[in-house]
Amino acid sequence: MSVNLERIKNDIHELAEIGRCRDDRGIYRMAFTDADMEGKRWLKDRIEHAGFEPRTDGAVNVSAELSGATDQARILVGSHIDTVPCAGALDGTLGVIVALECLRCLREQGVVPERTIELIAFSDEEGRFGGMFGSQAVCGQLNPDVLATLSDLDGVLLGDELRRHGFDPLGALDAARDPETIASYLELHIEQGPVLDRGQKSVGIVDEITGLFTWSVSLKGEANHAGTTPMEMRHDAFMGLADFASAIPRILDENGSARSRATIGKAQILPGAANTVPGIVEFSLDVRDTSPETLADLGNAFRKALSAIARRRNLMFEFQQKSYLPPVAADPAIVKRLLRQAERLELTHLQMHSGAAHDAQIMGSMVPVGMIFVPSKNGQSHSPAEWTAWTDIEAGANLMLHSLMDLANG
Ligand SMILES: [Zn+2]
């Protein structure tokens, strides 16, 4: 039994047109925007078309199930279809489409697995509202206070966005599942790094997923005239950010590991005039590592650095932790099964860790998880250049299909 690559291609191309910007060719399906909701409607249509019944839970996760012969705990398989701004066609989307194709294949072949297999597309994986919203809802990690206060980097409240689409924000609490009902969660995802592509492997089998925290930081000084304010009398907020950014390599060297990463991906200078000394800068900080201790050390080091820079430049600083995800290990028994299936299907493969965060990380706090990676061409992702060879997509999808059967019958 094998997947139908033509159907996968068709689905990828169709979904890639939803939220596509004509100017930069990027896809803009950020969580709970109109384009994201249109993507969810498209998915429900495809699910119906395949003869399954689409469901939407209180966190606006979309799912569908192939009923098993028994009422044993089920296998969940999926990913997400929301995107970062100016995204490519495969991040998250590929895992959802492959899961749908697996369900279609099994139904066509008349396979009735022992355990129910459920496809799930999680909401806001990419982090408009902190990230992993849908999988956190399924794992019961949300509460009414979080739901009332979550906002995006522009200050838009999650609750307002949900209400705009006709959902009660508190409904997300109802998406929580009983861990006893889920045997395991599988996710196929693009690697988003260069390791498989460089090593010419078709699939990766993930044994460990990196953890991360993101901060929203502001440095406050004093806005003033760019001509009349002497250099030594300024409280220039942007110069504070410049000092901080240039301290990052040293902070990682002294407090991090070879797997540590830190990124300032968004910054705003206020009031934002060419002839005014910046009074305020607001910026994001994203820090990752596979060890929880190292992450904590890095958090302390970044806080100390900000504090020292603020003192030196006569600035005030504030930061808010927008998200924290602990590192998670894949289930060793599932890793073993995935490796065995990859060998049986004679796929070139590699056991590796994931440097990106995924829904599997959240699910891993509740149930055993496994992840399959496929190569990212030139390691590129979060860009319209993101791509994976069709042959590798087919290999990954077949590995998922056979692994699902293995787990659903074992
Ligand atoms: Zn993703």
Image (tube, rainbow, N blue to C red):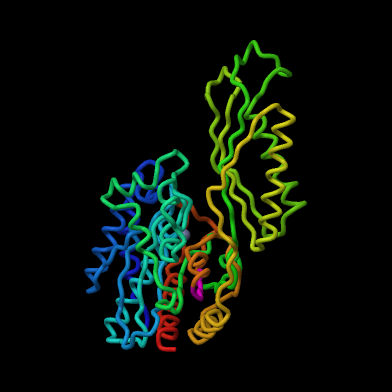
Q: Residue reaching furthest right?
A: 254
The stretch of residues the image draws in magenta is 367-373
The correct choice, above or below, for 33 with respect to 4 in the image is above
The location of residue 377, given as percent across then percent down, is 52, 61
- In front of the other: 163 or 106: 163
Q: Is residue 389 left or right of residue 43?
A: right
Mainly helix, strand or loop, the magenta region?
A: strand
Total labels drawn: 0
Residue at 57% across / 17% down in the picture?
A: 275
Q: Residue reaching furthest front?
A: 144
Quadrant in the rendering for residue 133: bottom left
Q: Is residue 344 magenta?
A: no
The correct choice, above or below, for 66 with respect to 134 in the image is below
The correct choice, above or below, for 43 with respect to 164 in the image is below
Q: Quadrant of the N terminus?
A: bottom left
The location of residue 29, given as percent across then percent down, is 37, 50
Q: Residue reaching furthest top?
A: 228
Residue at 29% across / 63% down in the picture?
A: 56
Quadrant in the rendering for residue 218: top right
Q: Is residue 283 left or right of residue 37?
A: right
Q: Quadrant of the C terminus?
A: bottom left
Q: Is residue 308 left or right of residue 41?
A: right
The location of residue 372, given as percent across then percent down, is 50, 72
Q: Is residue 400 left or right of residue 39?
A: right
The location of residue 12, given as percent across then percent down, is 35, 62
Quadrant in the rendering for residue 143: bottom left
Residue at 40% across / 81% down in the picture?
A: 73
Residue at 72% across / 47% down in the picture?
A: 301
- In front of the other: 35 or 138: 138
Q: Is residue 371 magenta?
A: yes
The correct choice, above or below, for 7 with respect to 334 in the image is above
